[in-house]
Amino acid sequence: MILRDLTSDEMAAVEKTGVPHSYAKGEAIIREGDEGSSFFLILSGRVEVRKSLGADKYKKLVELGPLDIFGEVCFLGVTRRSASVLAKESTQVMEFSRSKLEALIVSRPDIGLKLYREIARELARRLATVDGELKEVIVWALGDSQNAAAPVTASTRKLSVIPQANSAVPTRIVII
């Protein structure tokens, strides 16, 4: 939880920078591709994060609930939203803009350290999850993980070569 390390005084200062919003079931909170520079903290309700696959198709990435955050990638500097977020039920969120939080952090760097550390932890947790899912997709796409060549170590990076081996899978070098 992003606010777990904050004292009650620090939490009150952060809350003053946030803007509360309410969304009805099915309402879009964020649309993929839109510009943004804020993140959201879910106060109540549930949301679904989804990635467009084109032609009115999408992939549900995750469902989030109270005290979870979303939109943090744009808060950190990416200008376009990478996914859409829809309310699964009546949902209340607090939106934190980069400009307002940065103004607070100038006067209270201790708050900034704690917030950015928690955002980094959340991103690392999500990256680890996606890494595991990507591995499963690669193994599935190959059809048989035994067809993959053994990883080769080059300096400190591990290189994996996926052979063509009489299949439609082109040869690729993946740096892990």
Image: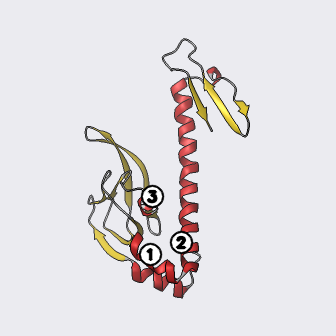
**Residue, disc 2:** 115
- Residue 85 lies in what quarter of the image? bottom left
Kindly identify the amino acid type of the residue bearing the numbered disc 2. Leu
Q: Nearer the viewer, residue 159 or 48?
A: 159
For residue 127, side relative to residue 95 (left or right): right
Q: Secondary structure at mark 2?
A: helix
Task: Tell whether label 2 touches label 3 (CB within 8 Å).
Answer: no
Q: Say few, some or many: other residues with alpha carbon within 10 Å of mark 2 (under 14 / 14 to 19 / 20 or more).
A: many
Q: Which residue is mark 1?
A: 101
Q: Which residue is mark 3?
A: 73
Mark in the foreground, 2 or 1: 1
- Across and down, in percent, residue 116 comes to 54, 68
Q: Is residue 20 above or below residue 175?
A: below
Give the percent coordinates (x, y) of residue 174. 59, 32
- CA distance separating discs 3 and 1: 15 Å
Q: Earlier in the sequence, mark 2 or mark 1?
A: 1
| Label 3 SS | helix
Q: Position of residue 161 (x, y in %)?
A: 62, 25
Residue pictured at 29% horizontal, 38% vertical: 54
